[in-house]
Amino acid sequence: MTDDIYGNYIVGQWQGPTDAGTFPVYDPATGAVVAEVATATAHDVKHAINGAAAVQPMWGTMPPVERQAIIRRACAIMTDRIDELGRLLVREQGKPLAQAIGEIQYGIAFLEWFSEEGRRAHGMTIPAGTATKRIAVLKQPIGVTAAITPWNFPSVQLLRKLGAALAAGCTMVAKPAELTPLSALEIARAFDEAGLPAGVLSVLCAQEPYEFTDVVMADPRVRAISFTGSTEVGKILMRSSADTMKRVSLELGGHAPLIVFDDADLEAAVTETMASKFRNMGQTCVSVNRIFVHQAVADEFRERLEHAMSVLTIGNGLDEKTEVGPLVEPAALDKVERHVADAVAKGAKVLLGGNRAKGADLHSDQFYEPTLLVDVDDSMLITQEETFGPVAPILTFTDETDVLARANATPYGLSAYCFTNDLNRAIRMSEGLEYGTVGINDAMISAVQAPFGGMKESGVGREGGPLGMEEYLETKYVSIGQVR
């Protein structure tokens, strides 16, 4: 494996390109090829599953403290290389360097947390109905697992799944997004150097996802699959999981509302809106998509938000001054432009931005200006679909019951945010919003110790916290009669 050709990590070995060839990974800021990556075949996937199944009994019965030691060594290796890993992440994905390093640090925190939680995967004893019986409940690893991760957070999404699986005693076969496979391969390298037994983790890259999913979903030895991505693909995986009754954990699309009431702290509301809306150029599943502002404070909120957006610096993520980098691929730009054009055609006004960003320092056409829209209504595409771009649409309201209904009027239910200083209203909104994660006066809600996931068509299952490890554990009831 050279600096610009990556192989797949399969059962403890690096496998270079085969007859299937390679595919390129592009830097969205420049259009240059960052590296070529070997294409995994169906045979490679089967080999990875065979290796995972072979080593599963050993890994699943290894004392948790020994699994923890390996995970901790991988954390130390990645921490030592964090600048290098951060720059690689920027080159394949585009986000600003500070955000890339923050993503990796957050992913390492998941590994550390789950390595501790693995030592607390307690069962229980339950009083029996007679004196001659004992009832025990065991927590055991579910077995071989698979993970399919997205391009927007290529490090943390794998580390969050992997940390829970490894700590629970499960092996894993993983496929990163074809746009951003390099970060996942470097994670595999860190675990390899940390002494992870061969077969416990394999990372395979394929330009066509079905090369991986068709094999994984058909193999009954793969007992659980965790996927982060679109709702459409999640539904396909859920249907195909039925044939072998796999456990599925799906974190799918979102369409997050942010509601600002007339008693809110507007400075805090704008700061939090900016942090959520423009992190990773708006390419996050929990990004603010619809901003509902009470009519009484709409003008002041708009002015504050417009000023904050107007001073954002656009550029290559490797430039430390950059706050808004490129979108990941041309199709992402097309969707943003389509949403903005639809909104304008239906009466919205562009107060800021609204075009592809140009400049002597911008070396690709995948940059889009931070864009502020007003006079937005619920008929527009931007209020119905996830934009995944640096566009902030403002809608207004006057009635709490009405805005709650509008916020819930979507098939998605991943994250929602509400800003108010009225405690009673905060309780009503937190209970009334049909979302798996709700932030009250807080739009940066991620935490390693908390259960993250969606309701409705935003997914099933939870990642993070104790519930995140439960996705990889089976509950076994044992009834023990008295030996006579």
Image (cartoon, helix red, strand yellow):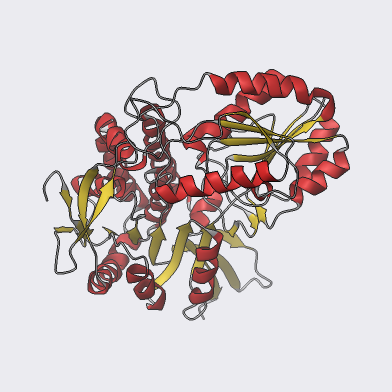
Q: Looking at the image, which residue is at 27% across and 38% down?
A: 88
Left or right: residue 249 versus residue 52 is right
44 versus 203 height, above or below? below
Front-lying residue, 225 or 384? 384
Residue 292 at x, y percent in the picture:
74, 36
Left or right: residue 406 versus residue 438 is right
Q: Looking at the image, which residue is at 58% across and 51% down?
A: 453
Residue 293 at x, y percent in the picture:
76, 31
Residue 141 at x, y percent in the picture:
42, 63
Q: Looking at the image, which residue is at 72% across and 23% down?
A: 301
Q: Residue furthest left?
A: 2
Answer whether residue 97 is visible to the viewer in this image: yes
215 versus 358 height, above or below? below
Q: Looking at the image, which residue is at 67% across and 45% down?
A: 345
98 versus 221 height, above or below? above
Please identify the quarter of the rendering in which residue 178 is found: bottom left
Number of marks drawn:
0
Residue 213 at x, y percent in the picture:
38, 70
Please identify the quarter of the rendering in which residue 29 is found: top left
Front-lying residue, 197 or 181? 181
Left or right: residue 284 versus residue 17 is right
270 versus 430 height, above or below? above
Answer whether residue 263 is visible to the viewer in this image: no
Q: Residue furthest front?
A: 345
